[in-house]
Image (tube, grey):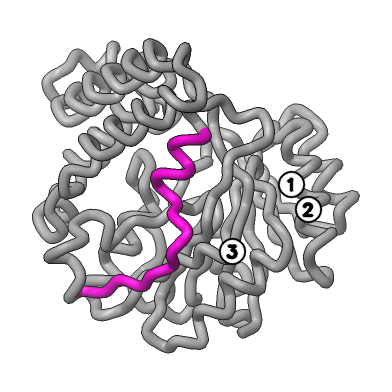
Amino acid sequence: MKYFIAIPTYNGGELWKKSAEAINNNLDHPLVQIIDSSSKDDTVKISKNAQFNVDTISSSDFNHGGTRNLAWQKHQNDYDVVVFLTQDAIVQNDAIEKIVAVFEDPKVACAYGRQLPHDDANAIARHARLFNYKEKSYKAENKDISHLGLKACFMSNSFSAYRIATLKELGGFPSDTILCEDMFFTARAVLAGYRVAYVSEAKAKHSHNYTPLEEFKRYFDIGVFHTDEPWIRKEFGGAGGEGKKFIISELKFLAEKNIFSIPRAIVNNMAKIIGYKLGQNYKKLPNNIIPHFSMHKRFWS
């Protein structure tokens, strides 16, 4: 399969430098398309030094789905697969080739790789990656919705790949969602009869040491997404008790690895729940307050 890499960037800093180096160290000079949202640091310089192709847009024009559409549509006639990374994801050995290989199955529309914690990840962030990105690969399709629920359309554009022909067929990513453009497309693909693949052998380091406030804002935005796109939960159902399983798993992990992190984890989880519930009810909130609750303030303007 002929593929290229696409990455939206904005003020990537030192972590972007490491990410760019990892791409060039592990690959034989593929096309890497950067869509930069007018960075104010050395992000563009680092990209050009790495021999990446750089297009610049206004920061006010960035949209999770729309900006990624710009990237794959620019090269849609020359490639079979587009691999998406975020600027803070560091690919590991052979990760790109392994995720692209899954498209030999003609029913696979999209795939995501295994995310490992960054070297500086705290215990809470390490557990989140271990819980959400298991060692066993799988493929999911329409018939799996009954037992997987929302997991049947899970996707992460921090490290993912898409068949360009299917992107064309289904209209690409939405350009009007606050986030979760990856889940939106994957849900449509699964309902259309395609498969999504999780490729655990394809690995990238990517994690966040979120504060409770950041968790609140992130889950507020997820609540907004599910309210604006109710068809996803209608078609796929809920998460099948994953939230409860996550909390129990996290407490066991922290009790063994870093017991002093448990109070922080409890606060983080409370922030997630409150943020998500408020996001689900954002239409009842005063308009001037909503952007302060959101991680993606530009969306509201």
Which residue is disc 1 drawn over? 19
Direction from residue 212 to residue 149 in the image, left or right: left
Expressed as whole percent of the image width and height from the top left, the position of residue 284 reads 12, 20
Label ID, residue 202: 3
Badge number at residue 22:
2
Residue 97 image-quadrant placement: bottom right
| Amino acid bearing label 2 | Ala
Q: Residues within 10 Å of mark 1 (few under 14, many from 20)?
A: many
* Image: magenta residue range: 126-142
Confirm whether the magenta stretch covers residue 128: yes
Q: Is residue 19 rendered magenta in the image?
A: no
Does residue 273 appear to the left or right of 221 in the view shown? left
Q: Nearer the viewer, mark 1 or mark 3?
A: 3
Q: Label 1 vs label 2: CA separation?
A: 5 Å
Dot 2 or dot 3, earlier in sequence: 2
Considering only vertical position in the picture, is 93 above or below 275?
Answer: below
- Residue 300 visible in this rendered orientation of the protein: no
